[in-house]
Image (cartoon, helix red, strand yellow):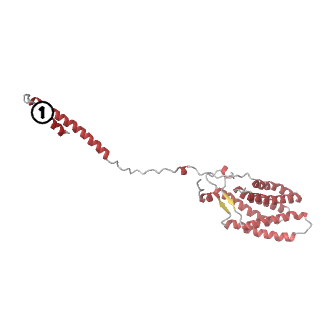
Amino acid sequence: MVTAARVCARAAFKSIPGSLSRSTFRPALSAFTNGCTQRTSVHFRSFSAHVILLNTPSPPSNAPQTPRKDENQEKAAPIVRENIYTLPNLLTLSRIAACPVLGWAIVNDDFYLATGLLVYAGLTDWVDGYLARRFNMRSVLGTILDPAADKTLMTTLTITLAMKDLIPVPIAAIILGRDVLLSLAAFYIRYTSLPQPKTFARYWDFSIPSAEVRPTGISKVNTALQLLLMGTATVSPIIPLDISLPLQGLQWIVAGTTIWSGASYVFAKGGFRVISSATKNRPPPPST
């Protein structure tokens, strides 16, 4: 651009007629060419600086980038709840509520009422299990209430029958000692398996399942034998036959199965199942 300006200026200078003095126009020509040079230089430098700024790469950033948290990780894990207001659970609670009346009847020698309550307990135990299986009313709370009702019934019968000298005190101590140890273990398992946060209100909220009880094979046999022993001892005062000898043999059998079943819960792996672990390892449902 500077060269073109100078060439045009010189051509215009040569075309001036000879009658005019070229020395008159020489200062103007020099000023014109110098001005073009300065303005072109300024524009060229500005353009060069702009090109350099555009082509200069930005320096790499060595600062570590904080990974973005997944939205699913930020959300709290949903709390699993279940319906605990079912007919099987209601029948089980009715068996537990009948235990104080049963104990009162035995202490006051009303063995006919006590026998009737034992029959009621046996029938409701069968009915609630049938309803839970037939109409899919199973619940984690039901797996806790059902053995709890059996233990409440067994504890009531053991204490009151021992008070009436219908079963030996050592047999009663073995039965009660096993039930106390299993109850303490159940409280501990409930606390350790309860999902976070572990609060007092959530601990006693049984609509939040944490672990379910799975009775062992020997435990089922022992429960049946204990009920047979307690039922036989309850009806023995009102039957005309002397059953003291077979009753004594049944007492020692029950003592052996009671110790065996208690040990099975300690050493067996399938005595209970933690619900949170099972839910964690369960594959996700297929997307719809």
Residue drawn at (72%, 67%) of the image: 217
Tell me the amino acid under the disc marked 1: Phe
Q: Using residue 23 as the reference point, say whether residue 89 is left or right of it.
A: right
Neighbour tally class for label 1: few under 14, some 14-19, many 20 plus, Cα within 10 Å: some
Residue 245: % across, % down: 86, 71
User: Which residue in the rendered view is the most extreme toward the left?
Assistant: 19
Q: Using residue 12 as the reference point, say whether residue 161 is left or right of it.
A: right
Is 206 situated above or below 219? above
Q: Is residue 227 visible from the viewing direction of this image?
A: yes
Residue 84: % across, % down: 71, 52
Residue drawn at (16%, 32%) of the image: 31
Q: Using residue 197 as the reference point, say whether residue 259 is left or right of it.
A: right
Q: Look at the image and tell me in which quarter the N terminus lies.
A: top left
Residue drawn at (17%, 35%) of the image: 34
Residue at which label 1 appears: 13
* SS class, disc 1: helix
Q: Nearer the viewer, residue 181 or 68?
A: 68
Residue 19: % across, % down: 7, 28
